């Protein structure tokens, strides 16, 4: 990724016109603006904090703009990739995320780590989200930034590949392998995180999404992973 030293702006130009831009952030940023040079119209994006975000410039500005400036005026930004698209069909690799639906989930999947949602919940996501088209919300416990931040990009890619198009919830809790639930709680305590906070995270998301079905880990942590048991 490329970090800015402060507020940053980026100008993109294409004589053929630009139908859309796809931005990949290394860290959540928040709202930013895009200005069409020819009309001066300003479009605000990023309000949901997506790490992978496609901006439909044609929908935002009408005629395809030939030059736009993207302004990150709320502090430092870390960008991994920017792709500009011409008019036409988008490739399947472009992820068009929808924000989480408040109170509208058919199924919530509580996955401790990125990869557990595929390894230990078998066909839940491709069947209910991809094949049947139900409103499926994934809620991760860990955020992985304390060990391997690139995994969040893998998590988004994995969900998109199996048909989940509702943006997941990333927990604020660190990742650490533990051999028992007791050790997992002990590790969290060393990080200043209480059992009440952990339980509250689950309760808040159940109340937020009101799922018809909630799916969680095996009580034995599948293969004895303490953080799986804890979640």
Image: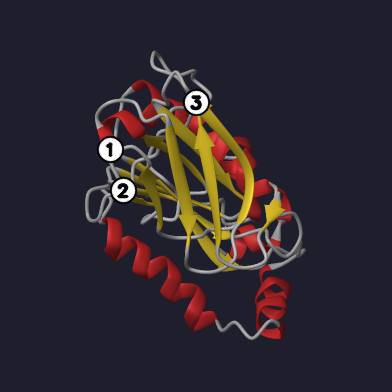
Provide the residue designation for mark 3: 14
Indicate whether 129 appears above or below 44: above
Choose mark 3 or mark 2, whichever is in front: 3
Sequence-wise first label, 1 or 2: 2
Q: Where residue 114 sits: x, y (%)?
A: 62, 47
Q: Horizontally, is 128 left or right of 82 in the view?
A: left
Q: Residue at x 38, y 41 (%)?
A: 37
Q: Is residue 37 visible?
A: yes
Q: Could you say which quadrant of the image residue 155 lies in? A: top right
Q: Residue at x 47, y 34 (%)?
A: 21
Q: The C terminus appears in which quarter of the rendering?
A: bottom right
Q: Residue at x 68, y 47 (%)?
A: 151
Sequence-wise first label, 1 or 3: 3
Q: Where residue 219 sits: x, y (%)?
A: 57, 57
Provide the residue designation for mark 2: 43
Helix, strand, or loop for circle 1?
helix
Nearest the eye: 34 or 81: 34
Q: Residue at x 34, y 26 (%)?
A: 64
Q: Where residue 23 sits: x, y (%)?
A: 53, 41
Provide the residue designation for mark 1: 60
Q: Alpha carbon of mark 1 to alpha carbon of mark 2: how far?
A: 7 Å
Nearest the eye: 198 or 15: 15
Contact, mark 1 vs mark 3 (Cβ under 8 Å): no
Helix, strand, or loop for circle 2?
strand
Nearest the eye: 15 or 220: 15
């Amino acid at each position: 990724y490329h970090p800015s030293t402060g507020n940053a702006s980026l100008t993109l130009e294409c004589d053929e016109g630009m139908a859309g831009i796809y931005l990949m952030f290394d860290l959540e940023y928040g709202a930013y603006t895009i200005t069409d040079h020819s009309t001066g119209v300003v479009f605000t994006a990023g309000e949901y904090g997506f790490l992978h975000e496609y901006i439909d410039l044609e929908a935002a500005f009408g005629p395809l703009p030939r030059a736009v400036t993207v302004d990150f005026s709320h502090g430092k930004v870390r960008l991994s990739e920017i792709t500009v698209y011409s008019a036409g069909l988008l490739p399947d690799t472009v992820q068009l995320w929808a924000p989480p639906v408040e109170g509208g989930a058919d199924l919530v999947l509580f996955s401790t780590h990125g990869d557990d949602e595929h390894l230990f919940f078998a066909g839940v996501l491709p069947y209910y989200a991809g094949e049947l088209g139900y409103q499926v919300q994934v809620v991760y416990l860990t955020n992985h930034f304390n060990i391997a931040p690139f995994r969040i990009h893998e998590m988004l890619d994995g969900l998109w590949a199996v048909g989940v198009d509702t943006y997941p919830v990333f927990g604020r809790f660190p990742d650490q392998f533990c051999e028992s639930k007791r050790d997992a709680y002990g590790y969290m305590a060393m990080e200043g995180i209480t059992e009440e906070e952990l339980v509250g995270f689950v309760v808040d998301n159940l109340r937020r999404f009101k799922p018809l079905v909630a799916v969680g880990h095996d009580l034995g942590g599948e293969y004895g992973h303490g953080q799986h048991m804890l979640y």
